[in-house]
Amino acid sequence: MDPRVGERPRPTPPTDAERHWLDRCRAGDAAAFQPLVHPHLRGLLSLARRHCRDPHWAEDLVQETLVRAFRALPSFRGDSALRTWLFRILIRLAAEPQRWRRGATTEPLDVDVPDHFDAPMVHDAMARELRDRLDEAMERLTAKQRTALHLRAVEGMDYAGIADVLGCSQVAARMQVLEARRRVMGRLKEHLDP
């Protein structure tokens, strides 16, 4: 048996570009935060929308994630990729919405959260119906399963990255994805069979 089975994955370190912007942020250049997080905004917003039924709350969740990340940058060691760290913050906040939704207790950052990443218009009625059923099936998953499947299918994240975000082993991350796929396919089966 592989001795690594069940062990926590080794995190992927930040890229050179991320290190550059991180160093500038840590040196006090607040303007460097925008180019640091900009490549990750689409994924953050997509995952937030998976967790929040209300698109406005999803945008608030991303904004709060960015605020928390900005404040925590001095303590970010860089052991994992910035993207993974940001997703982990978002997941923690999504799990405890009552803590960050109480009111506007945090000051907004000067980082634009794009709102034009909506799914493309689906003109075919069958495709719209299937998309609606998929969303419905995803809503019925546990938060961990929904997150794991989203990170794998939408973000293209490997199991090591998913494990890092969820704080579990790669085997557990893979099991979350597999169970989520099984449950979603079970709910979609009647719509997919000819």
Image: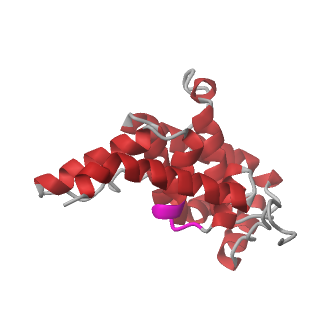
Q: Residue sitting at 32 percent across and 55 percent down?
A: 116
| Coloration of the structure image | secondary structure
- Residue located at (80% from left, 59% from top): 6
Judge whether 102 appears above or below 13 on screen.
above
Left or right: residue 110 compared with residue 185: right
Whole-percent x and y of residue 184?
A: 41, 49
Q: Name above or below for residue 81 compared with residue 88.
A: below
In which quadrant will I find the C terminus? bottom left
Secondary structure mostly seen in the magenta stretch: loop
Task: From the top left corner, tell me how far across and down residue 54 is, in percent.
Answer: 38, 34
> Is residue 134 something that shows in the picture?
no
Report the side of 173 relative to 28 (left or right): left
Horizontal and vertical percent position of residue 170: 71, 61
Q: Looking at the picture, how far across and down is residue 186, in whole percent?
A: 39, 49
For this rendering, which residue is in front, 67 or 41?
41
The quadrant holding residue 27 is bottom right
Residue closest to the eye, 95 or 30: 95
- What is the quadrant of residue 174 in the picture? bottom right
User: For the point 62% across and 37% down, which residue is it?
Assistant: 93
Magenta residues span 152-157
- Quadrant that contains the N terminus: bottom right
Looking at the picture, tell me which residue is in the foreground, 40 or 10: 10
Query: From this viewpoint, which residue is outermost toward the right?
Result: 3
The image shows residue 135, relative to residue 170, as above or below, that is above
Q: Residue furthest top?
A: 102
**How many discs appear?**
0
Res. 104 visible in picture: yes
Relative to 179, is 24 on the left or the right? right
**Magenta stretch: includes residue 192:** no
Does the stretch in magenta take in 154? yes
